[in-house]
Structures are given as C-alpha cells and as structure tokens.
Image (spheres, rainbow, N blue to C red):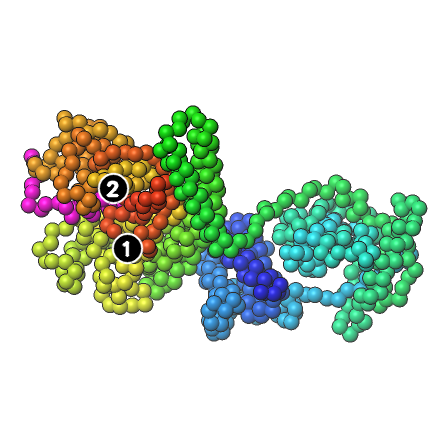
Amino acid sequence: MDAFESIKATFFQECDELLADLEAKLMLLEQGQTDMETINAVFRAVHSVKGGAGAFGLEALVRFAHVFETLMDELRAGRKPCDAVTVKTLLRASDLLADHIQAAQGLIPPVDEGRSAALVAELEALTHGGEAAPAMEDEDDDFGFTPMAFDMALDGAVAPAPVDAPTGWRVVFRPTGRMYANANETGLLLRELGRLGPLEVVLDDSAVPTLDALAVEEGCLTWTVDLAAPVEEAAVREVFDFVESDCELTISPLGGASEPALALAEISAAEDELDIAALLARASSAVAEVAATPEPSAAPPFQTPPLQTPAPVAASPVAPPAVAAAPVAAPAVAAPVTIRVDLDRVDRLINVVGELVIQQAMLSQRVLESGLARSSGIALGLEDLELLTREIQDSVMAIRAQPVKSVFQRMPRLVREVADMTAKQVRLVTAGEDTEVDKTVVERLAEPITHMLRNAIDHGLETPDERIAAGKPAEGTVRLAALHRSGHIVIEIADDGRGIDRERVRKIAVDKGLIAADAVLADEQVDNLIFLPGFSTAAAVSDISGRGVGMDVVKRSIQALGGRIAIGSVPGEGSTFTLSLPLTLAVMDGMVVAAAGQTLIAPLPAIVESLTPQAVDLHRVGGVDPVIRFRDRFLPLIDVALTMGFSETAIDPTGGVAVVVETEGGQQAALLFDAIQGQRQVVIKSLETNYRQVEGVAAATILGDGRVALILDVDVLVGDMRRKAARPDLKLAS
C-alpha cells in the first residue's frame, strides 16, 4: 500500500469514529438534549467527514455532507429550531452519510441517486424553507484553495492601522510538524477564520532555516491573525478543534490600536501565479541577512532588497507580536499516543503468553514433585515468576479488550429501519456501552444481537393501536445493555411487549413435529423451543422474519463463543433475552479437581464454596435424588463422575468433596468430586475445534505435567444434564 492509500485508509478509519460519535449525539438530540454543545458536535463530525472527503476527491460524499452541514450550521446559529421532525431527518441523513462512506470504500454499491436526491431535498427544505439552496462556494474545490501572493520585502512603508479598530480577536498559532503529518492545512484554518469576519495576517518566518537545512515536515512559521469581528471566543476556538493539540495557540481579545499586519490578498486565476522560486530565494537570503546582523534584537526580522513579485504587499518593519506572545502561550495539551497494530500480531503475542503460562505451570509442578521446601530460593523465584506471568497475561488481555460500544452503535439504525418496515414506534435504550470484552467476542456479537433486536421489534412489540388498547404507551421500548457478572459479560435484550405466548409456541412445535403432543415441558423449556431449527411464530415470511433460522443462528453463534442464552418472559409485560459470554477466550482461573481418576477444571468464578459432606446433611428426594443441606437450604448434589459417564456407580458423598457452584441464572447446586488438587490459571483450548463438542465440557487445557484436562461447563451440568437424568415417574416426598 502506497502512502496515499495508507492515508486514505486512515481517513476511513477516522470516519468510523466520526460516524459513531455522530450517531451518539443524534440520539441525544432525539432524547431532547438539544443544547448547543451537542449540536456543535454533530456539525463538527459532518464537517470533518466533508473536509477529508474533499481531499480525496469523493465528490458524491462531499456534496451530500455539504447539504447536511449547511442544515447543522442553521441549527447551531439558532435560525432553525431543532424539533422532532428535523431530528428524524438528521437521523436518516446520518444513515445515508454512512452509506456514502461505505460506497466510497467500495464495500457496497454506489448510493442510489434518487434516494440521495430525495433526502437532499428534505434537508434543503428544512434549511431554506422550501427555497432553493445556494450553490456551494466552489464545486471543483470545496476547500476554497486560492493562490495568495506574499511579498517578503520589509522595507516598504505601511500605513498604521486606525486606533478605533473594531472589536475582535487576535489569534497567534504556530503549527508543529505533527499537524501537517495529520493531513491538516494552515490555508483551511485561515479560510474558516475568514468566514467569521475580516482578517489581517502577519506571517513570521524568521524561524525558517536555509534551504540546505530545511525540513518540510517541521513547523517553522508563526501566524498572527487579527479577526475584526464581534464573534464569541468559542466560535474562534472551534476552528482549531482538531488541531489545537498539534500547534501552539493563543487567542486574546483585540481592542484599541492594532499592530500593522500583512494582508492576504486573494488573486484570480487570470492574475500571475505566485513565484515560489522567488519566495524561497527571498526566505533564504533573509535568513542569511539576519545571521550577519550584529544585534538582531534591534533589527527587523528580514533586511532584503525588494524583489519584483506580482501584487506586492507591504509589511511592517516592526517585528510581529508572535515572538513576544509565544513564551506566554498556554502549553498544548498532549494528545493520547496510540499505534495501530495488526490483529495477527496481537494474536501471536497472546499465544506466546499462553505458552508462557503453561511452561510456568510445568516448572511449578516439577518443583513440587522434587520435594523442595516452599521457602527455598527456587520456590520463591517461581512464585515471583507466577505473579509476573499473571501481570503479563492481564496486560496482554487488556490490549485485545474493546468496549461493546462499537457493536451497540450499529443498532439504532437497525431499530429505525425495522420500526419503519413494521409500522411500529420503537425507542432503543442502551446501557453499559463501555463494558470491555475480548475483541474476538466483540466482532462476533453483531450478528446475534441483530437477529434478536429484529425479533424483539417484529414479534415482541405490539402495534401502536394494540399497545394503546392494552394501556401501554404507543411507543415501545427495547433495551440493550451490557454488564460484567461473575467473570462473564452479560448482554441483555429486553422489550416491554406482549411476551411469549407459550400455548401458541407449544402448538406450533407440535404441528411442526418438533416435540411430542404429550410432552411435559416447564415454562423455561417451552420458551427455549423458539431456538429450534425451523421454528417460527410468524404467520407469513417477510423481509424481517418467518423462515425459522434467526434464533437458531443466535444460539449457535453464542455457543460457538463458549457462551449461553437464557429467556425470561412475562405474558403481557415483555421478554428478556440474556446472553452470557466469557470475558476472554485465552486464560482463566480454575480449580483443579479429580473425579473417578479424571482431572477436571471447575471455573473459579462459578464456585461459591467447598465443603466436606456430613451424613446428617445428606438427604434424598423420593428416595433417589441426593440433596445436601447448605446454609439452611437444600441443594441438588450432582455426582460429576456419574453424570459425565466416568463411572457407573455413585461414590459415597461423605468420602468426597462438595463444591457449591452458581449458574448464570442464579441457580445453585453442589458438585461432588473425589478431591480438590488446587487452584491454577489455565490456558483455554477449544475442544470443539480440536476434537468435537462434549456435553458438559466447555473447553480443555494443558496441565503442568503435560496432561490434558477438561474444563467443566457448570451451567450444563446443573441444568440440562441434570434434567436429562431426572425420572418423571418419581414424585416429590411430602
């Protein structure tokens, strides 16, 4: 990839960030937060997209962004109200702007001109009240680049500025090399300042070295701009929003007599072009003259013979005030330093860290087997190594951690489109967008969340008339939230709709032959029928649903990530779908246990307590199923070896160890093992990828002695496998 394409790729990456911020601010406007700061943020996002698109010649994107930007300019000037109609139009404009950007990237076909023109007409109608919009300043060059002639001779007389100069602002800024490296241009900043009012500009090029020492990537020029316009300081600072950290900037009120300034004279295309060679020669000779001057403090910055240039402009013999102002300028706020690293490199680093964890465990095992005292130097050194390994692992995992915000920000547009297709009024509420999770998990969350939101709107929410008849507001609410819980990330999709009609679900399942007509199912089992392949409650196939693949895809996607999904529904009040996913796919803390000669790993976040069963605390339900008394409650006692098929006979509970665990749904049970061997950090290896899926097993790992140990899936052991082993002919003891 050449330098131009690299810069262009960076621009599109920045567009993704700008679109995310744009969507977030528009959602605030939709919620009634129509303050000036939010409106300005929307304007800046669109303006930045437009500016970058103009630099790369993306004309379609520039034209649409210009109309979008013009309407935002009217809103921030207070000439147009930010009402509900305008906000809805802005939301659709944001969607179309995203399509234009994707089309510019070649990810989708070019945006339909009719669709774009229709929305442009709506935006212009809101902007101009139905009148024709003024043409863009320059269709060929939106940036308004205009050749400028500078006369660097300083021996000409300059008429002093009037004492009664209008109030305004003096802007002194010196760009650094970083500003130019970020593809920003001083000419654009001057143009934007010129839109605020008349300008007088002083250019201090005393820091420009000779040509043999000139480094084009360094900032050598200092600009002093006198803006003679009664505007707010915030409007001036807004021009420098994206470069303030990349330049030395001071803004001070302008009043009284103004300093003489070098005017920037605009010339037409018919006039002579700027003589760049003469300008560089003049700068070089000027620097040499300054170096030969005995007392530079008493001399002007330059003393060169006047050269013939087109439209010469006289300059002041007095040194510009930028030199004096520079020392008192406020230091620029350092921007966060970030680097872009290929994901493959991060993955390789994580794999190496995983191997480091395994090797550390092996060393610890060898030291333990050797019989060395825990106080020995080797043992103490290994403990330090273990702490260091854990710290390295946590740091590496933090590199891959990303907030789910990138996924959540895609959903408002989806909700708007599905709501329009179903003629429903829907409000999306999000929470926990900053919750961090492994990048692999984030990338694969989009599809299941998309399916579930579509189903929540299409099947869960009622029509406005139905909601009003049921005593609910016409607008339905869908809530999308993320949170951390017990070493997992939990995604909740909830709606306040009609809930699951279990009788209808059961009837459809029987009609499709998915279950037997006489099957006895609990409410939870009936709810889970919607995840069966081919199951659908839709009366007809539509663009949204009806083919019976959506929820099946959701379940498979979540299981592939090592997670699970649960349903909670109350008829007439709504439904809640809960996705539970691991925080990371690499390393976890676990308890090493033994069952029937097999070494297993129980996930530490799921463990509540461990205890030795006493005969007085053991009971049986119906004379068959064992339970154990735990803190004045009875919990199911699950023999892991028997349930997993490692043994055909149950062990004596009093001769084993009971580990109390809690599922994601809050259900508790006691798992019975032969013994507990210790606690260890283990590297997760996918069993499904390397072997096949085994019920009750979430993954595998390599122990310190080289053996493979299975990582238990606590939720499956406590839930599904236990229910399969249940005997329906038994009745509970009274």
Q: Which of the image's four quarters has the N terminus? A: bottom right
Residue 274, by quadrant, is bottom right
Q: Which of label 2 and label 1 is nearer to you?
A: 2
Packing grade of label 2 (10 A; few <14, some 14-19, many >=20) is: few
Q: Compare residues 39 and 186 and report the one nearer the observer.
A: 186
- Rendering coords of residue 711 (x, y %): 30, 44
Q: Is residue 57 above or below residue 580?
A: below
- SS of the residue under disc 1: loop
Residue 733 forms part of the magenta stretch: yes
Residue located at (28% from left, 58% from top) = 551
Residue located at (80% from left, 43% from top) = 324
Q: Residue extending furthest front?
A: 370
Q: Is residue 672 above or below residue 25?
A: above
- Contact between marks 2 and 1 (CB within 8 A): the answer is no
Residue range in magenta is 713-734
- Amino acid carrying label 2: it is Gln
Q: In the rendered image, which residue does mark 1 sit on?
A: 692
Q: Compare residues 154 and 647 and report the one nearer the observer.
A: 647
Residue located at (58% from left, 68% from top) = 58
- Rendering coords of residue 6 (x, y %): 59, 62
